[in-house]
Image: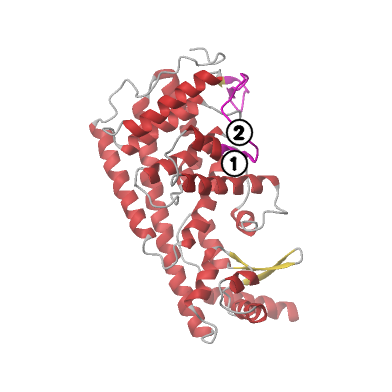
Amino acid sequence: MDPRFPYNDLPPLPPPVDLETRDLLKACIAAHKALAGLRQATGHLPNPAVLINTIPILEAQASSEIENIVTTTDELFRYAEHIDGADLATKEALRYRSALYEGFQSLMERPLSTTTAEVVCTRIKGVQMQVRKVPGTALANQQMQEVIYTPPVGESLLREKLANWERYIHEQRDIDPLIRMAVAHYQFEAIHPFTDGNGRTGRVLNLLMLIEQDLLDQPVLYLSRYIIERKADYYRLLLGVTRDGAWTEWVAYMLDAVADTARWTTAKIDAIRGLYEQACDWIRTQRPKIYSRELVDVLFNQPYCRIQNVVDADIAKRETAARYLRDLVSIGVLQEQRMGKEKLFLHTAYLQLLSNGDHRLPSYAADMAFNTASHSGSRS
């Protein structure tokens, strides 16, 4: 095929190859085991909202970075509740998180479909997105700006191929759902139904398919972490299916991605649980009069806390809530910051744990010693 011309002959699914080979089925078993471990870990957290408010933001950051939309974990959490004032990259990454939520909610009303994809892409881009009606979309090599792939054109053809994509997802029940997810992801990216946002939309759809297939309860798999670390392989293997029909290599990559990120996310959740218990012990020891599990829950909903968050949780009135947060600053749990006219309280240990690639637990005692030394230095 000539990459400069639309690939209108993109073959329908299923692929004309055996994808349930011995090696791929072994990889499936490993990925299923890792997902089961992740599912179990999510049930062990005292406050399930912790995951919904954190892991999707990490996924949003990585998935956006794959498309060269770069922001920081700090910025994303800082503006997670109030997007006004954020830069364009941060706003776009936060829209990815909203798209993930909206897609997750949509599964309660309808199965995964072209409509789901349109809803997700619309939320990601912040404007109404529908299946392409006009030609002109092509993918180019970033270094040489050479066209490497031109997707099919014509709305009726695209919708026909998307209908086949839907049938494959829902009707090929004899194929392992993880293999179906990998195949469906390639096909969606090859159809490339939107003028922009296809990659991010496709990665949201991966998580939604795992939920729909009852392999996850919540969209908390940090799948884009694997892809951003192996970005060149991701695009090379996608292109390998198109050019050479190299389905086995592509599916193996995606199965490894699921297994690796499920294990990584499980380890991160275990570390969050460890930090949560450490925070409970530290606050109960240092400030027993203000300690409550409900207050600790607020601190772990996300790394940036506002006085209003404590009030909304019915823990205390505003003046008392402000005093509680200042007490937590004094014992090294929080760090007070200003964002315009508003006070923010940063849970530094939590942000550090979420931002780092490893799962080592920070120390509240060390943070208190650092804050004490900093205040002493500023007074001298």
Residue 140 in magenta? yes
* Prevailing secondary structure class for the magenta stretch in the rendered image: loop
Give amino acid for label 1.
Ile
> How far separated are the C-alphas under marks 2 and 1?
9 Å
1 falls in the magenta region = no
Instruction: Give me the residue at 29% from left, 34% from top.
Output: 173
Q: Is residue 235 above or below residue 29?
A: above
The residue closer to the viewer here, 372 or 127, is 127
Q: What residue is pinned by disc 1? A: 124
Looking at this rendering, what residue extends furthest in the left direction?
22
Query: Which range of residues does the magenta coloring cover?
Result: 121-147
* Label of residue 129 in the image: 2
Quarter of the image where the C terminus is located: bottom right
Left or right: 69 as drawn, with respect to 165: right
Q: Amino acid at mark 2?
A: Met
Relative image position of residue 104 (x, y in whole percent): 47, 47
Does residue 250 appear anywhere in the picture?
no
Quarter of the figure with residue 25: top left
x 66%, y 45%: residue? 89
Contact between labelled residues 1 and 2, with CB atoms less than 8 Å apart? yes
